[in-house]
Amino acid sequence: MKKVALLVGLAAAFGVNQAKAVDWNWAGDVRERHEYQLLDKSTQSTTPGMDRNRLRVRIGAYPVINDELSAGVQLSSDTDNTSASNTISRNQNFGNVFLPKNIFLNEEFVNYHPKAYCLDGKLNVLIGKRDVSNTIIRVDNLVYSPDLTIEGATLQYGKDINGKEKDGVVLIAGYYFVNEAASSTVVSPVMYLGQGAYTGKINDVSYLLGAGYNVYRNLQNLATVDGNTTTSTASVPTSWAHSGYDIAEIFGKVGGQLTPSLPWKVYGQYALNTADHASYSSIDNSQRNAWLAGVTLGDAKKVGEWALDARYTSIQRDSVFPLVTDANRKVTDIVNVKGFELAGTYHLVQNLTIGARYYNYSNINDSTVPAVNPQLHQLQLDALVKF
């Protein structure tokens, strides 16, 4: 009560007259992970396995200020102890002689959903940095990593203020800054996005079907804006900075109940980079496709419940933008990979789940040393607490 009174008093002192009406909506999670990674070099020999322990911490507040205005702020861990260094991961390794772990600003956004002009709160106008899954329509991690938070402006129709798709038509339009050029001679790298989907239900089966277009511009200036870009992100093909990415995607998921306590879901996504060799000489027109398909049984939402997931993914070299797709599949590069994942989750006690995920991936093409044929075997063991 004393803390609440202090907050109200401070708000009143700064002229905020409706501080008592604010619903802060605190949320966060803590994940402890053990990861073992083995990269086969041939059928006869292997490289030593990489064995490491990792953490991820996120905590934020998502206040509903009034009927037309909400916001969000989230802090998180990152991969480095001294500076934020990875676009697509919030994991941080244990060790470094017990040094404290740095915390960074992971989200900050304002969400205006006007009531006027017959909109009745159906349209969200988002400005700032927000979790990609709550900003756009993201069925899975083919095009965008689940840890990504994108920066810019978004118009949403058919999502609630928390980013969940409502029944019916869902439309998204976005303009995002890949990097900001503080120069009058260098044009900033940007990304435009448009998506449309429909969510509904037929008898006891729910579904979401949609399509989108993701356009990147001025990527040739990314290294100019940030000369350390290629070293501060995960390994990508050497030609990526001179490639074009105009990515068309289709996606969907269908689900229902096998029993009252056992849900099922089938999901998939396909992406095609419509930019071609004629416009960008580094693009191989035969290497522009990516797809993912999977099935899930259970959801592990309640204590004693479990979930199983299996998926197959193929990402050709020039299909998706390497700096924003999921890095867990990396063999030699993040892209140019194919393989499968198997996962299981169990809800052990209230708010605590334990799980395991196995990755088996290889390169689609290994033009440098074809005989090497590297293959990734990776096992992640997780304990996740949400609050």
Image (cartoon, grey):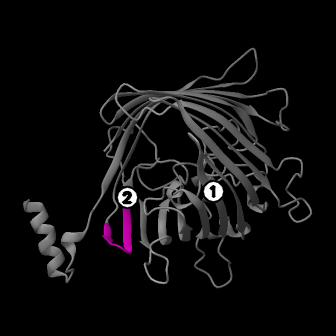
Q: Main secondary structure of the magenta part?
A: strand
Residue 217: in magenta span: no
Residue designated by label 1: 198
Q: Which mark is residue 74?
A: 2
Which residue in the rendered view is the most extreme toward the top? Answer: 44
Which residue in the rendered view is the most extreme toward the front? Answer: 203
Q: Which three-letter amino acid code belongs to the residue tagged 2?
A: Gln
Magenta residues span: 64-74
Q: Is residue 242 or residue 56 the one in the foreground?
A: 56
Q: Earlier in the sequence, mark 1 or mark 2?
A: 2
Q: Position of residue 90 (x, y in %)?
A: 46, 48
Q: Which three-letter amino acid code belongs to the residue tagged 1?
A: Tyr
Residue 72: in magenta span: yes
Give the side of residue 155 with respect to residue 290, left or right.
left
Residue placed at 49% from the left, 84% from the top?
117
Give the side of residue 189 with respect to residue 284, left or right.
left
